[in-house]
């Protein structure tokens, strides 16, 4: 297995801990309301009397809005010098968009505003992760896992808060409170923007576009994309329908639903740097296959179970492994591309959260009679990811670094 050339970090120029902490903090602050949407969209939907399919459509529109920003932001991180100011701008974009959404009563106005707001959060991800993997060329998955901790800490904090706000007040006030930390951290990033390493300014060229096309428009590249999509479709089907399943099928309150969701994501969040570090040492393939296989089996168990305790445990296992291997899958996309880290991550995020967003609508549709059917759908998506990863030729040059054991 070929290894990347030693980076500045390995030569002794380590990344400052305060910068790593700032990126993790920024990730968490930017993700507060988008993560809260896993409960706030169902909260909006139940308040408006929407069906599971309509709620699934809202999830899909929200994710599609975000997907539109991933690739442009990824290209920017590879070509723009002052990435610090771009990172700072994302907080104000996110906060303003969601704040405006909190004042509407219209389905489509709400859908459009949350989609626009999510583009700001989506822009953060390839910008921040692109900078990090450029700093940590030999520890990409580890760096991505450390960045991911901020987002998953937000999950653990914001989901119970959303449950509390929905129980005490409503979805409007929940959004209005949650945007406050986003604006505050945005001000902090304006102060520290000069600490973000600058990049040599360049213009995207036709040659860049041709290189991207050659990298991805082949059997190996399309296989990587398909694995990313099916992995995230399995995750989306579970994470978008579980709150409705617990509330409608088992009469959970908002606080109980929120606590269950936060607990189920906790262990995967903690495991991301660990799984990333393992994959940096032994390869991406074993973790991608193993994680998706476990998720497929757990989701199938959740669908078949008649015990709420067993269902919760199965969903917890599925979400834990799916969250835990996310950084591994992102690193696999960078490994496949070899260079243009920001663009590669932008593409990976776009496919994962763009095309895969349709899983929310599909999960709502198959769950229109029984929401547990969404878990059977999730199991099928994860199984497809397993099959694609397991049948990837180990000796394929363009994926050798990504999937070699």
Image (cartoon, grey):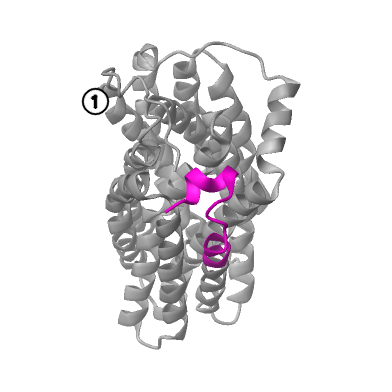
Q: Is residue 192 visible?
A: yes
Pick whichever, 118 or 380, lies toward us.
380
Side of 175 where 188 appears, left or right? left
Magenta region, mostly helix, strand or loop? helix
Residues in magenta?
A: 385-405
Pick whichever, 166 or 126, lies toward us.
126
Q: Residues within 10 Å of mark 1 (few under 14, many from 20)?
A: few
Side of 229 where 84 appears, left or right? left
Side of 93 where 36 appears, left or right? left
Query: At 50% across and 36% down in the image, what residue appears?
Result: 121
Query: Where is residue 116 shown, x and y percent of the image?
Result: 61, 38
Pick whichever, 109 or 141, lies toward us.
141
| Quadrant of the image occupied by residue 78 | top right
Query: At 53% across and 70% down in the image, what residue appears?
Result: 383
How many numbered marks, from 0 up? 1
Side of 112 where 238 appears, left or right? left
Query: Where is residue 149 shown, x and y percent of the image?
Result: 32, 43
Query: At 55% across and 61% down in the image, what residue appears?
Result: 45
Q: Is residue 105 visible?
A: no
Q: Is residue 53 magenta?
A: no
Image quarter in which the N terminus is found: top left
| Quadrant of the image occupied by residue 10 | top left
| Quadrant of the image occupied by residue 285 | bottom left
Q: Which residue is mark 1?
A: 17
Image quarter in which the C terminus is found: bottom left
Query: Where is residue 31 shown, x and y percent of the image?
Result: 42, 41
SS for tag 1? Answer: helix
Q: Is residue 388 magenta?
A: yes
Q: Is residue 152 above or below residue 311?
A: above
Query: Where is residue 148 shown, x and y percent of the image?
Result: 37, 42
Q: Is residue 62 above or below residue 244?
A: above
């Amino acid at each position: 297995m070929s290894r990347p050339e030693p980076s500045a970090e390995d030569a002794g120029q380590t990344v400052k801990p305060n910068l790593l902490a700032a990126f993790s903090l920024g990730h968490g602050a930017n993700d507060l309301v988008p993560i809260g949407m896993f409960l706030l969209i169902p909260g909006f939907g139940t308040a408006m009397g929407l069906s599971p399919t309509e709620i699934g459509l809202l999830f899909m529109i929200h994710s599609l809005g975000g997907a539109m920003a991933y690739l442009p932001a990824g290209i920017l991180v590879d070509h723009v010098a002052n990435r610090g100011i771009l990172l700072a701008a994302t907080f104000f974009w996110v906060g303003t968009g969601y704040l405006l959404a909190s004042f509407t009563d219209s389905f489509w106005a709400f859908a459009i505003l949350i989609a626009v707001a999510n583009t700001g959060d989506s822009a953060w991800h390839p910008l921040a992760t692109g900078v990090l993997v450029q700093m940590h060329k030999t520890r990409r998955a580890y760096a991505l896992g450390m960045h991911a901790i901020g987002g998953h800490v937000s999950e653990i904090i914001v989901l119970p808060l959303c449950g509390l706000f929905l129980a005490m007040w409503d979805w409007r006030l929940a959004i209005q409170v949650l945007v406050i930390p986003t604006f505050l951290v945005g001000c902090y990033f304006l102060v520290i923007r000069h600490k973000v390493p600058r990049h040599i300014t360049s213009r995207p060229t036709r040659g860049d576009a041709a290189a991207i096309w050659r990298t991805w428009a082949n059997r190996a590249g399309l296989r990587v994309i398909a694995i990313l999509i099916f992995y995230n479709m399995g995750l989306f089907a579970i994470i978008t329908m579980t709150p409705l399943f617990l509330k409608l099928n088992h009469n959970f309150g908002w606080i109980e639903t929120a606590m269950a969701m936060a607990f189920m994501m906790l262990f995967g969040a903690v495991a991301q740097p660990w799984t990333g570090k393992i994959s940096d040492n032994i390869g991406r393939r074993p973790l991608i296959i193993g994680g998706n296989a476990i998720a497929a089996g757990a989701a199938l168990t959740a669908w078949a179970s008649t015990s709420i305790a067993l269902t919760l445990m199965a969903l917890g296992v599925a979400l834990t492994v799916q969250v835990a291997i996310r950084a591994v899958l992102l690193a696999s996309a960078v490994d496949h591309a070899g260079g243009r880290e920001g663009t590669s991550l932008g593409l990976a995020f776009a496919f994962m959260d763009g095309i895969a967003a349709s899983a929310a609508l599909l999960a709502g549709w198959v769950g229109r009679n029984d929401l547990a059917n969404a878990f059977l759908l999730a199991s099928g998506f994860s199984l497809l990811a397993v099959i694609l990863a397991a049948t990837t030729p180990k000796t394929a040059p363009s994926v050798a670094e990504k999937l070699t054991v």
